Image (cartoon, rainbow, N blue to C red):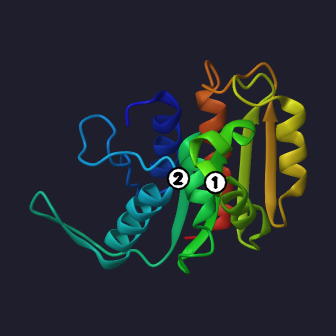
Amino acid sequence: MHDPTVLAARDSLVKEGFTVCRFNFRGVQGSSGWSSFTGSNEKEDLLAVAQFLLAGSVVGGTRVEPVSKLLLVGYSFGSIICGSLIDEIPEVQGVCAISYPYAVNWALVSWNSGTFWSAFKDSNKSKLFVYGDSDNFTSKSSLDKAAGKLSEPKVITCYEETDHFWMGRHKELGQNIGDWAKEACPR
């Protein structure tokens, strides 16, 4: 939750006036439950968060007003889960995939990697696909090929001299996300 890449995305969206909800999947940093290693539990987690935001609720005594549109932003493993749900939640306007772990997604969601990728790449909703040319888990050529398979509408940005963790590039990444969000989900 306190990862600099996640915070850069959050800060850029808040700056643009979006309501932002960050969460950990089950089993992360002391949360209950455990990872499914198939992505099924994590999809349930994201669906629950989406329903929470769409319905509105009370958090810590403060009423959170319901939203009518959603943008999903996922980093690394989170981008796999966000992409897989792009068309399963009608209110989703688009998905931003940061450092999609394309070459190792088979290990992260077991037998579902092809299904999860297809749901994302074939969607006709807005997509922002951002990655570094020096990603630690997937080669630039593999990410270039994956990006080329994404259906329109899409924005693809490959950052030079940038790894999976975005060291020193968070400000630029945040600006890119904010700019895309304004187009994908006009306020």
Give the quarter of the image for residue 167: top right
Q: Does label 2 or label 1 sit earlier along the sequence?
A: 2
Q: Residue at x 29, y 73 (%)?
A: 65
- How packed mark 2 is, by other alpha carbons closer than 10 Å (few <14, some 14-19, many 20 or more), is some
Q: Is residue 55 visible?
A: yes
Asked whether 109 or 56 is in front, the reply is 109
Tell me the amino acid under the disc marked 2. Thr
> Would you place residue 24 above or below residue 86 in this image?
above
**Disc 2 marks which residue?**
38
Asked whether 10 or 31 is in front, the reply is 31
Answer left or right for 173 relative to 144: left
Give the quarter of the image for residue 137: top right
Q: Residue 126 location in percent, x, y?
A: 72, 66
Callouts 2 and 1 close, C-beta under 8 Å: yes
Give the quarter of the image for residue 1: top left
**Disc 1 marks which residue?**
111
- How packed mark 1 is, by other alpha carbons closer than 10 Å (few <14, some 14-19, many 20 or more), is some
